[in-house]
Amino acid sequence: MKDLSGQISDEALCRQAVAGDRSAEGMLVSRYLRLVQKLAYQYRGILDFEDLVQEGCIGLLNAIGGFDPARDVHFRSYAAVCIRNRMFRAMRDSGYGEADIVPLEESMEGVTPDPEQLFLGREQLRQVMDRLEKLLSPMEKKIFLAHLGGFDYQTIADTLHISLKSVDNALQRVRKKLKTIDPN
């Protein structure tokens, strides 16, 4: 399967890689290395950049092996989540995060999602995230993502080499900006 540019699609490469084609796996890694680096750059103040890239590549390889083309999701979206989750796990495991974070799968046990509600929820989340991207400064975004990742104020301050008060002020500004977002 080829896309409009004549390249083999990520999904087709993923199937080939799972079947044992190392060149297909290499093509996917080369296509997504820039994404891994971009995400690692965003979190570089929390962990070393090279360590984050390494963890992101592991997440990418996990995405290649775990991708299910039968689900209605693009590989790029799935890979980005796997890469980001692997980086968050590395940050948490390095001693910077709180250990009591409950994985989403465990918190949702026994809940049967309605497909329409899932779609609407994803669309609403996408709109909120797009709006946040425009509203938050780069530093506010780093602090907010670290806070969402379970890091306490002191850890964020130490890793970003800023004062505790700066972290608190940034999160206060983020909260005010979040209140201005209308998800509907």
Image (spheres, helix red, strand yellow):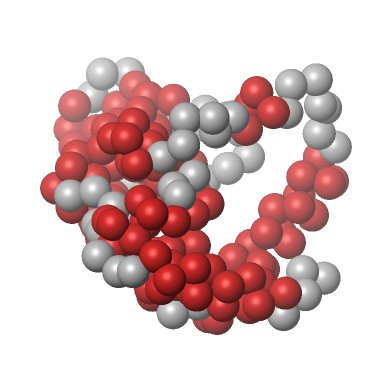
- Quarter of the image for residue 15 reads top left
- The residue at the point 81 percent across, 34 percent down is 113
Q: Nearer the viewer, residue 46 or 6?
A: 46
Residue 137 x/y as whole percent: 44, 79
The residue sitting at 59% across, 30% down in the picture is 102
Q: Where is residue 134 in the image (x, y as percent from the top left)?
A: 53, 80
As drawn, is 177 to the left or to the right of 78?
right
The reply to whether residue 23 is in sight is: yes
On-image quarter of the N terminus:
top left
| Position of residue 78 measured from the top left corner of the image (x, y, whole percent) | 48, 41
- In this rendering, the answer to whether 142 lies above or below 152 is below
Quarter in which the C terminus is drawn: bottom right
Q: Which of 179 and 165 is in front in this view?
A: 165
Residue drawn 65% across the image and 77% down it: 176
Frontmost residue, 13 versus 159: 159
Image location of residue 127, percent across then percent down: 67, 68
The residue drawn where x is 43% and y is 71% is 165
Q: Is residue 168 left or right of residue 93?
A: right
Count of marks overlaid on the render: 0
On screen, 80 above or below 123? Answer: above
Q: Measured along the vertical axis of the image, is residue 109 above or below residue 91?
A: above
Taking the image as drawn, is residue 1 in sight? Answer: no
Q: Quadrant of residue 124?
A: bottom right
